[in-house]
Amino acid sequence: MIHEFKTPIQVHTPHGKGEALLLIDYNINTNSVWIVRLHGGIIKHYDSNDILTYGNLMKGEGQIIEIPKHWKK
């Protein structure tokens, strides 16, 4: 299954902040793959273990996330 986000989702990756454009879900035994646009128009594919999403302010969730130390800032 491929899901296109009508409104891109703000995410943080090992390469910095970006916008998730697509999500590819293969099956329950395989992690999903996120297609992310990074600063400068760079497109990268990330395993779901390498994506952090920000909270939804409309639901009262915060925008603070804990970025792993080994990820580039």
Image (tube, grey):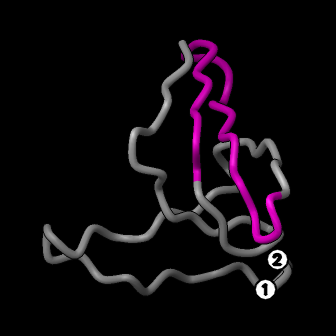
Mark 1 crowd level (few <14, some 14–19, many ≥20, 10 Å Cα): few
- Labels 2 and 1 touching (C-beta < 8 A): yes
Mark 2 crowd level (few <14, some 14–19, many ≥20, 10 Å Cα): few
Which of the 4 quarters of the picture holds residue 29? top right
In the rendered structure, the answer to whether residue 33 lies left or right of residue 59 reads: right
Q: Give the vertical position of 55 relative to 26 (above or below).
A: below
Q: Which residues are magenta?
A: 20-41
Indicate the position of residue 67 as horizontal and vertical percent values: 65, 81
Which of the 4 quarters of the picture holds residue 14? bottom right
Q: Is 17 contained in the magenta span?
A: no
User: Mark 2 to mark 1: distance in Å?
Assistant: 6 Å
Residue at 63% across, 69% down: 12
Furthest residue toward front: 41
Dot 1 amino acid type: Lys
Q: Which mark is residue 71?
A: 2
Q: Which mark is residue 30?
A: none
